């Protein structure tokens, strides 16, 4: 550590201002600069969303005017059905998150509690698969869904169900390993006891194990939820064509990029509303997410 | 749980057993029904390989779930693995296949489809052919053309060839006024759909060579026949006017001797052509090499800058006597909580050279061209990624710092090591043990950080010498996206997949190194 610890300080005297600055003060300056850097774009977005100026240029005067006109416009323009995007995003992200937790937990349970041929190979393959993001195969996903859609329209391009299915394809790769580690920390004697009591494997899994691993389920659910809200590339390929089917990421991008300057204020209003729930969720569950991060999740 | 009596136990087990069995049977039935449905469609289409795979998969699922208490691991793995195999493993293999085809705009389907499409696309009105009084009707959401041919009434749609219908009532012009089962459109209804109506081609039969009925204005229909005639035996097309002959020369399209081709072509395997194109054509090779270099540079600099700032802040704040650490911490990780797709767009607005906050306010009206200057655009991408990424590095570094025992630092100080030496020779190596794998996955993540790049710069500014839509801030992954789905230069799925294969190879190499480094595989019990 580059600064002295309390033991080195003369114990009789109150430290002088200069001493305090060398010891702690400069840290506050660094902290303030870091907070300015991290917080400033967010303050700017909030200010722009409340500014009735109507253009990107006008948004530069921070907090000079206050009006909710951008928010009203956001919800009253049929060509960009923001409310629909919001609902679509919630539906896709919730379904993906629940499905991911369920599929991941099933797989992690079998890897953690059962011994079978190919178990090690299975774990290794998952580890390997997770290195290759799904979006690399975007062309093939697009073509596969085009063919599937000819047979079953609900699984074709433009369908939220198809998008959820594609996301679930990535469920095992990313999360099983995270869950597997946590499942291993639950003593097997607990399920042994239940087995002796006559509970079947499914009963043990659903009523005992799932409750004990609830924290990791919450982490995976949350990471998966935030991941799907943020996902742009596959969503734009699968849903891009129809404005009503879009998620927030695809819809807001299309909206702001068609007329950058004049759509900017309304976009920022949409951005604020889209970001708020995610950020609140994140800050409340910070503790759990940070635990999950160190276990290998990356944003 | 309280201890239930034996009877209670047996009863609850029995009841839940029945319910579980019923649900299981129901789900299996739905899965099988869906498989049969899809299978029939595949069989009708002649897709035998997918059909076989589907059959094997369905039988496997039935076997795994049909017997209680057998294949237990299978029961738990099958649902996730099914999705994994279809939407992650299969699509990757399929990408590999596409990389060796000419799939893309103008080469979208089979040869048979192309032959039909060529004939349907190249219609011309047959001179002196009869004209038919026509009406437009609607049935099952599709438009139908209803014509009167002397004393018969014929109806057909784009998909259904013309066939006789009964029970029509005619109007004063001799066209159909009402028809049972159809809703005949009025002129007022036809007007807004005139585009659909004038492009409606109703075939006489399943063979497009027999010609079509088309109606340029909606009240009269005329006979149209292919202007380019297909000779099935010789597998050639002949232009009736010029007499030019187009042949299948193995390039996936019909070509005339002078090199002109008819659209559309069809999909064929092209071997290593896409790779040859990627590395052979200077207008692709140059940009591709630059994009690859930048992809590595971006991923490396991203990890370096975010880690340096994150670690620095972690060290600064790792001082228990400092007040307000929690507040700093919460405010500093806000960028990490902010949805990533919005970050790119918000910063794109702030970096806008003409109107953006950075030029107009922070730099006092300066004229810094963040968009069109290659290096400035790259710098802007790195700044935004620093903003996005340092909170993560700060969080993980803090965690790692706190796990280093204080005694170790104490010992170094007692031995007279300078703070900088302590940091470099003791703290950093210790930190790298838990952090190295995270840095490697951060590298892999940024290697494919599509969302940031595409939403911030769209990969621009575009290289002027490039024949594909490649730019100075493009990563390989955004290049794949633009080549496959970009609006500008037409879709080329084959070339895009060839690029994707390159990414696979690179990531494979990185993860191999990563695995070897971290010994994760050995930890697998």
Image (spheres, coloured by chain):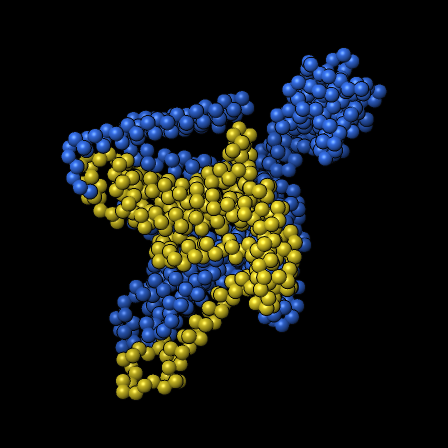
Chain colours: A yellow, B blue
Q: Residue drawn 64% across and 51% down?
A: A258
Side of B345 where A12 appears, left or right: left
Q: Residue furthest top?
A: B151
In the foreground, B451 or B234: B451
Residue A20 image point, x, y percent: 37, 82
Q: Residue drawn 58% across and 64% down?
A: A66
Side of A25 where B206 appears, left or right: right
Side of B456 where B122 appears, left or right: right
Q: Residue drawn 51% across and 42% down?
A: A137
In which image quadrant can residue B414 be found?
Answer: bottom left
Residue A47 image point, x, y percent: 56, 64
Residue A129 image point, x, y percent: 41, 43
Q: Residue furthest bottom?
A: A13
Q: How many marks?
A: 0
In which image quadrant can residue B427 be found?
Answer: bottom left
Point out the image quarter for the C terminus of chain B.
top left
Q: Is residue A34 above or below residue B66?
A: below
Q: Is residue B261 above or below residue B238?
A: below
In the foreground, B478 or B323: B323
Q: Is residue B366 above or below residue B261?
A: below
In which image quadrant can residue B99 be found?
Answer: top right
Q: Residue drawn 20% across and 37% down?
A: A195
Point out the image quarter for the N terminus of chain B.
top left
Residue B443 image point, x, y percent: 45, 55
In the foreground, B110 or A189: A189
Q: Is residue A189 visible?
A: yes
Q: Is residue B224 visible?
A: no
């Amino acid at each position: 550590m580059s600064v002295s610890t309390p033991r080195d300080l003369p114990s009789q005297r109150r430290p002088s201002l200069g001493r305090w600055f060398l010891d702690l003060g400069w840290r506050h300056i660094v902290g303030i600069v870091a907070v300015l850097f991290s917080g400033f774009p967010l303050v700017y977005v909030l200010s722009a969303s409340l500014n009735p100026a109507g253009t990107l240029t006008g948004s530069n005067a921070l907090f000079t005017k206050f009006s909710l006109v951008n928010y009203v416009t956001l919800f009253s323009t049929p060509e960009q059905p923001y409310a629909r995007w919001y609902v679509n995003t919630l539906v896709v992200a919730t379904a993906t998150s629940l499905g991911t937790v369920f599929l991941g937990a099933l797989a992690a349970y079998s890897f953690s509690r059962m011994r079978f041929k190919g178990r090690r190979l299975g774990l290794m393959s998952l580890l390997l698969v997770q290195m290759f993001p799904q979006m690399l195969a975007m062309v093939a996903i697009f073509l596969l869904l085009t063919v599937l859609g000819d047979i079953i329209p609900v699984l074709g391009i433009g369908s939220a169900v198809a998008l959820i299915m594609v996301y679930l394809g990535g469920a095992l790769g990313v999360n099983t390993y995270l869950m597997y580690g946590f499942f291993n920390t639950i003593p097997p004697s607990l399920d042994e006891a239940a087995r002796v009591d006559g509970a079947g494997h499914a009963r043990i899994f659903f009523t005992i194990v799932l409750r004990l691993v609830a924290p990791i389920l919450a982490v995976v659910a949350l990471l998966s939820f935030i991941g799907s809200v943020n996902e742009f590339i596959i969503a734009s390929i699968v849903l891009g064509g129809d404005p009503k089917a879009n998620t927030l990421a695809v819809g807001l991008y299309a909206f702001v990029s068609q007329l950058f300057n004049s759509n900017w204020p309304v976009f920022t209003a949409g951005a604020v509303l889209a970001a708020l729930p995610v950020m609140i969720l994140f800050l409340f569950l910070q503790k759990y997410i940070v635990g999950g991060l160190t276990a290998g999740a990356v944003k | 749980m309280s201890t239930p009596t034996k009877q209670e136990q047996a009863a609850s087990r029995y009841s839940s057993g029945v319910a579980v069995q019923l649900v299981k049977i129901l789900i299996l039935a739905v899965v099988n029904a869906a498989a049969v449905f899809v299978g029939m469609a595949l069989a009708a289409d002649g897709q035998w390989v997918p059909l076989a795979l589907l059959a094997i998969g369905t039988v496997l699922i039935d076997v795994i779930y049909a017997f209680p208490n057998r294949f237990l691991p299978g029961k738990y793995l099958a649902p996730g693995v099914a999705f994994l195999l279809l939407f992650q493993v299969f699509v990757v293999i399929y990408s590999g296949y596409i990389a060796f085809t000419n799939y893309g705009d103008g080469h979208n389907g089979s040869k048979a489809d192309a032959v039909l499409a060529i004939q349907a696309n190249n219609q011309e009105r047959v001179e002196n052919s009869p004209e038919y009084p026509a009406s437009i009707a609607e049935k099952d959401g599709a438009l139908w053309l209803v014509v009167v041919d002397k004393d018969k009434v014929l109806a057909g749609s784009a998909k259904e060839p013309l066939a006789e219908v009964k029970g029509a009532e005619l109007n004063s012009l001799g066209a159909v006024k009402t028809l049972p089962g159809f809703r005949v459109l009025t002129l007022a209804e036809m007007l807004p759909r005139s585009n659909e109506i004038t492009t409606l081609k109703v075939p006489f039969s399943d063979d497009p060579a027999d010609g079509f009925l088309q109606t340029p204005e909606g009240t009269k229909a005329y006979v149209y026949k292919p202007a380019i005639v297909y000779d099935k035996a010789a597998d050639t097309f002949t232009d009736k006017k010029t007499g030019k002959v187009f042949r299948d020369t193995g390039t996936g399209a019909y070509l005339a001797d002078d090199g002109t081709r008819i659209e559309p072509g069809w999909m064929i395997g092209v071997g290593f052509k896409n790779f040859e194109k990627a590395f052979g054509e200077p207008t692709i090779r140059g940009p591709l090499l630059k994009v690859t270099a930048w992809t590595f540079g971006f991923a490396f600099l991203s990890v370096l800058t975010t880690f340096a700032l994150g670690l620095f802040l972690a060290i600064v704040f790792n001082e228990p006597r400092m007040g307000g650490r929690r507040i700093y911490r919460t405010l500093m990780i806000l960028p990490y909580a902010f949805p990533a797709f919005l970050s790119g767009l918000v910063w794109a607005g702030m970096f806008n050279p003409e109107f953006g906050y950075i030029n107009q306010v922070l730099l006092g009206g300066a004229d810094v061209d963040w968009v069109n200057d290659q290096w400035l655009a790259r710098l802007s991408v790195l700044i935004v990624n620093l903003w996005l990424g340092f909170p993560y590095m700060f969080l993980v570094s803090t965690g790692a710092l706190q796990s280093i025992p204080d005694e170790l630092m104490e010992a170094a100080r007692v031995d007279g090591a300078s703070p900088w030496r302590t940091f470099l020779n003791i703290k950093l190596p210790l930190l790298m043990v838990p952090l190295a794998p995270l840095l490697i996955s951060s590298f892999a993540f940024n290697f494919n950080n599509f969302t940031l790049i595409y939403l911030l710069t769209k990969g621009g500014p575009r290289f002027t010498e490039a024949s594909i839509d490649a730019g100075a801030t493009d990563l390989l992954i955004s290049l794949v996206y633009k080549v496959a789905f970009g609006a500008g230069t037409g879709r080329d799925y084959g070339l895009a997949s060839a690029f994707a294969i390159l990414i696979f190879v690179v990531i494979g190499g990185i993860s191999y190194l990563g695995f070897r480094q971290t010994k994760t595989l050995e930890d697998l019990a």
